[in-house]
Amino acid sequence: MARSSGPSGSMVVTLFGECFADGHPTDGMERVCSTRFAPMADGGFLRVRGECNLQGKRWEGEFVLSTESLAEHVVEVLGVRFHRTTSAEAIELMLHWIAEKSRRMVITAGPEFVMKSQEVPEVLKISRAADLVTADGIGVVWAAARMGRPVPERVTGVELVLELLKEATRRNQTLRVYLLGSSLPSLEACLAVLRRDFPMHQFAGRDGYFPTTEMPHVMEAIADFAPDVWLVGMGQPRQEQVIYQWLSQLPPCVALGVGGSFDVWGGTVPRAPQIFRKLNVEWLYRLLREPSRIRRQTALPR
C-alpha cells in the first residue's frame, strides 16, 4: 500500500483489498488491481467513505484514491488487464483472501490466452472479472515492456501454487486444496507428490474426463470438501470458463487455472531445465519438444 497526503488533508491510498461504504461494497465500482472502487470524481480521484481491509489491517474514514496511482499497477495488452505484481505479492494477496474467506478468481495468462480473448468475447469478459491476472508467458512480458509499462516478473501458475503452499507451510497456515483436471493416472501421481511434499495441507481431486452433464455432481463433491484453494487444470480458456461459471456455487475459496501443471507436479511431463527457465526461454524448450506449438507461441502480434 502507498500513502500520501491528498486534497484537503485527506489520504491518498493505493489499495489491494475491498473498499466498503456503510459496510457494503459501493455501488457502481469497478475492479482494478483486485480492488473495487467508487466512480471517478474530482479530476482523477476516487472518494470512498467507510472501511477497507488490507492484509489483515483495517482502515476507516474517507479514502481518496488516486486513479493515476492505481493505473500504475495495471498494463493492458490487447484488452486483457495484467497486474504488475511479483510472485511474492500475489502470494501475500492470495493468503489474505484465504484467511478472509473471500471468493476470488486468479488467472495466469500468456499470449495464447490474450489472442483467444480477441476471438471469443466471453474470454475477455472473464479476464475483466478476475481478481488477479498475472503475466504467465514471456510474450506478455515483452509486450508490456514495449508499451513502457513492464511487469516486474513473469508469474506462472506452475510455480505460483508451489510457492503458495511453501509460504502457507512457513506460516503454519493449513490449506485445503482441490484439484480438478488431467487424466486419472496423472492426477493420482500429482496428489501423491503434493501429499508427500506438503504433509500439513489437505489435498483431494478428480480427473477432468467426465461428461458435462456430470458437472453439477462434481461441484457438489468439491463443495463438500470445502477447499481454500480450487485448482482447475483443463487448459485455457476452458479452465477459466469453468471457474467463472461455477465458483459462485462453492464455499468461499481462491480459484486458479493451472493448465498442465498437474502433469508437471506429478512427474508425468518434464518441466524445462532450470537454465531455460532462468533465461526466460522455457518456451524454446517446449517448442523443441513439441514443434506443433509454433503457431500458438507466435500468436501475440509484435
Image: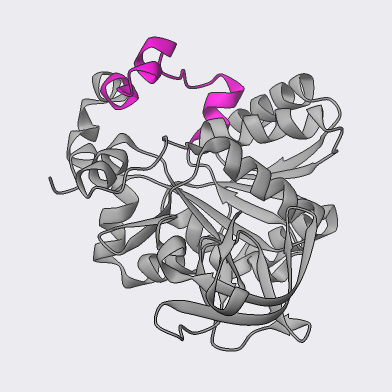
> Closer to the camera, 206 or 8?
8
Q: Residue furthest front?
A: 8
- The quadrant in which residue 169 appears is top right
Residue at the image position 45 percent from the left and 20 percent from the top: 271
State how the image is colored.
Answer: one colour
Q: Residue furthest left?
A: 302
Q: Is residue 99 left or right of residue 108?
A: right
Magenta region includes residue 80:
no
Q: Is residue 76 left or right of residue 39?
A: left
> Closer to the camera, 251 or 292?
251
- Is residue 230 visible from the viewing direction of this image? no
> Closer to the camera, 272 or 156?
156
On the rendered image, what quadrant is the N terminus found in? bottom right
* Magenta residues, start to end: 260-285
- x then y, percent, for residue 249: 71, 70
> Closer to the camera, 141 or 5?
5
Magenta region includes residue 278:
yes
Residue at the image position 14 percent from the left and 49 percent from the top: 301
- Is residue 133 visible from the viewing direction of this image? yes
286 vs 154: above or below: above
- x then y, percent, for residue 293: 24, 34
- x then y, percent, for residue 88: 59, 36
Residue at the image position 71 percent from the left and 61 percent from the top: 219
